[in-house]
Image: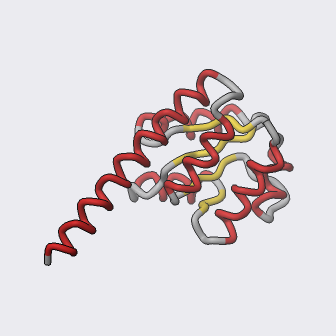
Amino acid sequence: MQIESLLGLIGLARRAGKLAVGEALTAELVEAGRARAIFLAQDAGEATKRKVMRHDARVPVFRVPCSKEALGKAVGFAGCAVCAMQDVGMAAAAAKKLAETSPENAQAAQRVTEKKSHIDSRKGLKKDKKSRG
């Protein structure tokens, strides 16, 4: 897997305004119900890992095989241990890239894919209702 393409996608989400960077903003996004995937750097501290893993029941958590510095560079900061994506399409694309890195990431990717298909099916229902007028 090319980690650069994943980091590019995370950077694109940041520029699009669809990424929360840091523990506090990630927690806010999860509490608001708008987070679709959480990305955790491999060298994140134990306290950060514990805080983030509490959200795993609600939002899939991916362990990104890169350092805090590399993840931070992708989002425009000196370092970033955790970030959360709120766009389901971008989250699904990132999940697809991370699925082969570990069994935990494969399970999280499955959850994101299921969520995306659910959201896409609901969008179809809304379009049908509008067209029936």
Q: Is residue 98 above or below residue 125?
A: above
- Residue situated in front as seen by the camera: 6 or 83: 6
- In the image, residue 24 lies at what x, y percent? 57, 56
Task: Tell me which colouring the rendered structure shows.
Answer: secondary structure
- In the image, residue 21 lies at what x, y percent? 65, 58
In this rendering, would 31 be left or right of 95?
left
Q: Is residue 126 above or below residue 7?
A: below
In this rendering, would 129 be left or right of 21?
left
- Residue situated in front as seen by the camera: 130 or 53: 130
In this rendering, would 93 be left or right of 33?
right
Q: Residue furthest left?
A: 133
Q: Residue furthest bottom?
A: 133
Q: Residue furthest front?
A: 132
Residue at the image point whose x is 75% and y is 52% from the top:
80
Q: Is residue 22 above or below residue 59?
A: below
Residue at the image point whose x is 58% and y is 28% from the top:
106
Q: The C terminus lies in which quarter of the figure? A: bottom left
Question: Residue 25 sits in which quadrant?
Answer: bottom right
Residue at the image point whose x is 53% and y is 27% from the top:
107
- In the image, residue 3 lies at what x, y percent? 81, 43
- Residue situated in front as seen by the camera: 92 or 83: 92
- Residue situated in front as seen by the camera: 28 or 60: 60
- Looking at the rendered structure, the number of numbered marks drawn on it comes to 0
Q: The N terminus lies in which quarter of the figure? A: top right
Residue at the image point whose x is 68% and y is 40% from the top:
97
Q: Residue furthest top?
A: 103
- In the image, residue 7 lies at what x, y percent? 77, 52
